Amino acid sequence: MLDDPDDVEAIVPAILQAAGPMTLAWTWKDSSGAFLSALTVEDNVMFVILSVLVLIASMNIISGLIMLVKNKGRDIGILRTMGLTEGAVLRVFFLCGASIGTIGTILGVLLGCAFAIWIDPIFAAVNYLSGGGVWDPSIRGIYRLPAKLEWGDVLSAVSLSLFLSWVVTLFPARRAARMNPVEALRYE
Amino acid sequence: MSDTLRLSGVTKTYNPGKPTAVEVLRGVDLAVAPGEVVALVAPSGAGKSTLLHVAGLLDTPDAGQVLLDGTDMTRLSDRRRTMARRDLVGFVYQFHHLLPEFTALENVVLPQLAHGTPRAQAEARALDLMDRVGVRNRATHRPAELSGGEQQRVAFCRALANAPRLLLADEPTGNLDPATSDRVFDALMVLVRSTGLAALIATHNLQLAARMDRVLRLDAGHVVPA
Ligand SMILES: Nc1ncnc2c1ncn2[C@@H]1O[C@H](COP(=O)(O)OP(=O)(O)O)[C@@H](O)[C@H]1O
Ligand SMILES: [Mg+2]
């Protein structure tokens, strides 16, 4: 017997071997193929949707930074006249945006993991607050929401949001660095 | 000994080739010797700011040369010019342009940190400079908590924080009432004389100009002795 039904393919060759020729292996995965592929599609689509959400959040970082760069035009100008290089100004604004992205990612991971781990109590709390009846187990025969924390999922979510927020930050940061200090300091 | 600042044949035109072209500098020649304080007088719009920006390596001339301490800076990369500006030039503007989030002391310390000076040493120098112009007791105030004259004095200290060779001041007292303007200008001269650096000070105040070593006039894009 297998501990994990997902590993069924691993023993198929052994069974075929033992049963000799003229045998056909028909696993549970073959019999519910359509259902399984639907689950896979759902998995992928979910990832795309969540990526779009991360992208939208990154756009918020961009717009916030662009406003910041606009507001700080004079200060950037004065820093440049003091002798800060373009690279130094770029680093200032990159650090600003990247730290927003990083703090956001850390908070997101903590919240997301907490949610997955304590899904049942959270669910019960929601049920209690809304006066019950959110989910009636007797209808569908599902008594608890299965939530499994996969480190692979966490890793891909973290790398996606870190990557997007850092890359996106480069554009406004470069804009700040390229700013002409003379233009920024004109006052007439 | 070579001049601290030398401009030769500097021209600058804004929006060249367009109907809106403005020919601001048409062949400027000038030299400022070490320790010399030179006034640059001209009415508003004559191109004083443009000239100072070119001299301070913030802007590039269309033609001609800018020499700082005898070195031609005209064709250097932006990075090299930024480094030269950091080490050799201090700027003062009509408005103080202090960073509003930092205290007066931090504003004077900042350029020194950019230069690589250790923090304790930078603070000691900042306090010493601020002492000389009478704003040491305002060290922990934010710019918004200072009067116009005090803000400008702190801005002088910031300009001199890295011990530059040349000070470029663009109407440094243009924004102050006459009495304050006089006292702030005195403070500036105290700093300049005690550090022995060269200064080119743009102003349209002829009284102030008369107190400097030499007066130059910017006329129709040329610099002429007044
Ligand atoms: N970026 C620019 N584009 C077009 N014209 C400019 C620009 N900067 C300055 N000028 C023009 O150049 C002239 C000189 O300006 P400026 O150097 O600021 O004079 P000042 O400091 O003596 O008042 C003005 O007529 C101004 O309109
Ligand atoms: Mg001007």
Image (cartoon, coloured by chain):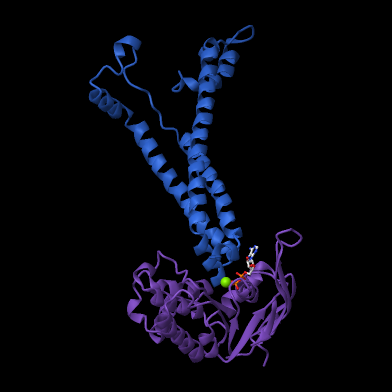
The mark total stands at 0
Asked if residue A83 shows in the view, the reply is no
Q: Is residue A118 left or right of residue B177?
A: left
> Chain B's shade in the image?
purple
The spot of residue B167 in percent (x, y) is: 56, 81
The spot of residue B70 in percent (x, y) is: 69, 85
Looking at the image, is A137 positioned above or below residue B166?
above
User: Which of these two is toward me, B187 or B73?
Assistant: B187
**Residue at horizontal 51 percent and vertical 63 percent from the top:** A74
Quadrant of the image occupied by residue A146: top left
**Residue at horizontal 34 percent and vertical 15 percent from the top:** A142
**Residue at horizontal 36 percent and vertical 72 percent from the top:** B146
Looking at the image, is A151 positioned above or below residue A67?
above
Looking at the image, is B175 positioned above or below residue A169?
below
The spot of residue B49 in percent (x, y) is: 60, 73
> Chain A's shade in the image?
blue
- Location of the N terminus of chain A by quadrant is top left
- Location of the C terminus of chain A by quadrant is bottom right
Q: Is residue B109 left or right of residue A13?
A: left
User: Which of these two is toward me, A77 or B172?
Assistant: B172
The spot of residue A15 in percent (x, y) is: 56, 15
Ligand 2 location (quadrant) = bottom right
Q: Please, which residue is most extreme toward the top here?
A: A22
User: Which of these two is toward me, A25 or B39?
Assistant: B39
Looking at the image, is A164 positioned above or below residue B55?
above
Quadrant of the image occupied by residue B109: bottom left
Quadrant of the image occupied by residue A116: top left
User: Which of these two is toward me, A26 or A141?
Assistant: A141
Asked if residue B97 shows in the view, the reply is yes
